[in-house]
Image (cartoon, helix red, strand yellow):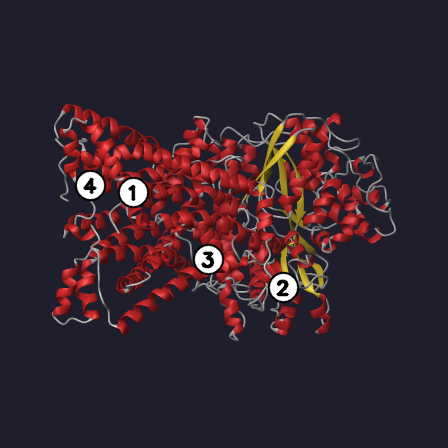
Amino acid sequence: MTDLAHGAPVRKRRRPAGFSVASYAVVGLFLVWVLVPILVVTVNSFKRPDAIFTSTPHVTFSPTLANYHKVFANSQFMQFLLNSTIVAAGSTALSLAIGVPGAYALARLPVPGREWWARLILFTRMVPAVALVVPIFVIFEKASLLGTYWALIAAHTTFNLPIVIWMMRSFFEDLPIELEEAALVDGCGQFGAFRRIALPLSSPGVAATAVLCLLFSWNEFLFALVLSGQKTETVPIGVSSFIGTVSVDWGGSSAAAVIALIPIFFLGLGAQRFLVRGLTFGAVKG
Amino acid sequence: MPRPDNHLHGPAPFIASLAVGTLLLVGCGSSSSSSASPTGAATTGSGASVPTSAAAVLPSAAAGSSSPAAATNPIGSFSGQKLVLSRWAGDPWTAGQKTAAAEWGKDTSGSISIDAIPYENLHDKQALTLAGAGGYDIIYVHPSWFGEFAKAGYLAPIDSDLSDASKNPPGFSAASYLPSVLSQGAYNGKQYCLPDFVSTVVLAYRTDLFTAAGLQPPKTLDDVVADAAKLNGKNGASGIILPGKATGAVSDVMGSLITAQGNWWYGPTGKTTLDVAAATKAVTFYTSAAKYAPTGLLNDSVDEVSLAAAQGKAAMAISTTPSLQALEDPSKSSTVGKWGYVPLAFTADKPAGELIYWNWCISAKSSHKDAAYSFLQWYTSGAQQAKVAIAAATAGATKDFYTNTTVLAKLPFLTAMNQALTHANPQPSLPTWPKIQNDIETAVQNAILGKITPAAAAAKMKTSLSSNLGG
Amino acid sequence: MAATRPGVRPGRASQRRLAILMVVPALWFVGALILGPLGYSAVLSLYKWSLTDINQAKPFAGLANYRKLIDDPQLMHALQNTVVYVVASVTVELVIGFLVALALFQMTKGRRLANSLVLLPMIVAPVITALLWRYIFDPQFGLVSQVLSSLGHQGGIDFLGGAHLALPSLIIVDIWQWTPFVVLVLHAGMLSIPEERIEAAKVDGAGHIRVAWSIIRPGVIPQVLLVLLFRTMDTYRIFDTVFVLTRGGPGGATETIGLYTYQTGFSFFDMGYAMALSMFILITVLIISSGYIHLLRRREVFR
């Protein structure tokens, strides 16, 4: 039973046509349901306001780039994109730098209370954001780090680090232990076994984990709101400023949303195989 | 002058002065001076005297002594000073402010960058930033959290700036502001903020649909319900639309409806004075009107209300005046020029409204307080507010603003707004208000849903007010 | 694969030193920026304070905030809504997710493409999700209303403003965003079922539906438990899409405990009570999830 969640055997099957057609229909319908909202907002981003707010729907409309011009004319939006990139990359790097060695130790080395630590890290995923935001704000305020990239990078590491530890731990455990033992026999030392053998072998896992961290950091809102300064605000704040209750700018917000979606779309494709693994803390290895 | 209203912050003989004065000015506007800007002329007239009661303003205005707003340059030179301004995001307001900030920077060699974040998150962001190291110089403070910030010592007093002739254009002082609005930015006897965004809740109605149906413009709220019933479903439009989402606008409408009955949520001592009968009547109006509203009322905030009305979805709309500008904006409206505006009134002789405004304040931790004051003085002055008004449909809080005939002509709802503000109560600025407001809005929503009766909704409001304010 | 995997040549002192060296930065970070702040929140829940008191002396309130939890009708109401939200969204996501995963499992071509398209909603930021659905649900101009009106139905449907539809509408948004997660997890589980067992069942004459029911369904039980664990944990705390889409309205019909906690602290200025509510959420979610984790540990999915 233990192998249930592991390894994906290659399948070669032939299905009778009827059942197969039904399967394609189900998946097709589901894809329509999944994609329509995203397509609608994309189409809206190319519409003039009067074409969005019409009582009589038109199938055709003359596309405009005005909404995109507006988003980029808001000179801050480029800054938002830059800030999000810095914060996401920084938090990913930090999480990997401290998380990967930690994960290896928890997977392979005699850490006292190893299982207990691992469970504690799972527990951190249950903490409501409201309970973390205020104390973390106080810490960074005392350290005079508010409004700096460091504050956001560290804050995003609070949710990225547990993911790195759990995912990398499961990757390391999947490696055949004999290779590392051979390295030890060759006189590499335990750290050498990690650096020369385990790390290179699990590099696809590191890459997948990195993509997930980038993704979660890119989308995060509450920490970004509370800890950022005017110069370090990220894309979700920028997008939501188009949606406020004061005045909804459907065209502008749609364009901003599409711009924000494009990078994570490609990240998502890159992380495709590992997304589930990340979201389930390494417990599902699809 | 009947003044049934209670004011928490100072006696504030509210806007009777503003309203009647302006009305006269609107009336005689065409015959009075030819508007805009006599260059370099000092702002004289209304600024010279210090009217403290309604009676004092009237003669001076009627005598035509107020001159139109004169454009003055910002005062001072702040080379190398970089200020940060915190406000909510939303165009045209934010865009207009960016232009103004750039203009101010050109004249003073300082610079202001604007941190515009969603209104929903503005309080939290400001409260945390000010509790921390600061980081903001100029902050746009909503009445509902002004008291909290002032009490916490986040704001810098500006009394000495206001009375310092070197920091103001000739003739400009605290007396240049409408006293009842300015006094809302005072706490424990100290002035902290300069107001703008003066607005209220009014009714817009489709003149074309009313004429076609042979109806007179509605004079009372009973007329509104009757007309909504008659017009509902005709020409693809519902009878009326008004805000129903719990974002503060429902409470603004409710505040206007109880003010129209001479009542208010609380009295001068801060304890509740809500008359349950008045609140019941207000909720009853709300629920009756809601019957003739388009689908989705309870998730409509002011922007959805005006957008739906602008697109011809309703024959009447009750909303805040700044949002109603969408009706006259060709990029959003298919009904431009087809709207008339009247104040809310239960009896025709007593139009009323809640006074909506925002406070411009300076952070106590700012190291550029002089520069910040320079910007605020200049930005809230009549001449600058005239530009804001034309772009974004909010009124200024200085007396000379109301003498600018160019602006008055551009704001079709201004007459209705001024009538509404003859009986006005300012938006509450108690620290406990957000919780009470949420209770009020939830009660109204439940009454509209038919889950509770209007009387029960009113009772719930009273309970919330009593438990949060006492009385 | 066992719950405790032997380390490489355990027992050596140098290994232990290395282990501590490697694990300390991570644990220090978890302690300093997660557990420390959490403990601080627990302390703060014993005081009466608002955001502006953050750097000032706060009056100690003892257990007053926790006593308030016991008879707070609004909390009870929010809890009811939350339970409906959790049960409905997780159930529907599980059922649809299983069917779609099964269909995906049967596909021979285009599975990779379908996989990458399916994951899209999961990676959309909540802010943008709310924007998408606000437009779709808008009774005047939204997509559904436009489609209905072109079919001759006028007046639109009151999704987010209707007493009975508001909560289901929010659940629909959750289903849109997170059913893909269920699909991918269950699909991964199906791929790990040994091929021989399915073939053997077929040889015994089992039809597709029978195979699905008696081989595949029990085969993915660990993944189902995982989905239950993660979706319950997350839906129980839901607040961002609710905040943007309905603000808990109409008439409190969509007030969840996540939203109530946020509003109490940030909108109603009662941070002490908000911290107590956070602790309540944390403890209840811990109890619920430890049930799942216990089951998962028995199946050795989570170690």
Rendering coords of residue B1 (x, y %): 75, 49
Q: Chain of mark 1?
A: A
Q: Which mark is residue B311?
A: 2
Residue sitting farthest toward the bottom: C152
Disc 3 element: helix
Give the alpha-carbon distance from disc 1 to disc 2, as whole Å.
54 Å
**Residue C162 visible to the viewer:** yes
Reading the image, the residue beneath label 4 is A175
Total marks placed = 4
Q: Nearer the viewer, mark 1 or mark 2?
A: 1
Q: Are marks 1 and 2 on the same chain?
A: no
Q: Residues within 10 Å of mark 2 (few under 14, many from 20)?
A: many
Q: Is residue C163 above or below residue C266?
A: below
Reading the image, the residue beneath label 1 is A204
Q: Are marks 2 and 4 on the same chain?
A: no
Cβ–Cβ below 8 Å for labels 1 and 3?
A: no
Amino acid at dot 1: Pro
Q: Is residue C95 above or below residue B415?
A: below
Reading the image, the residue beneath label 3 is A38
Q: Is residue C175 above or below residue B470?
A: below
Q: Nearer the viewer, mark 2 or mark 4?
A: 4
Amino acid at dot 4: Leu
**Residue C247 visible to the viewer:** no
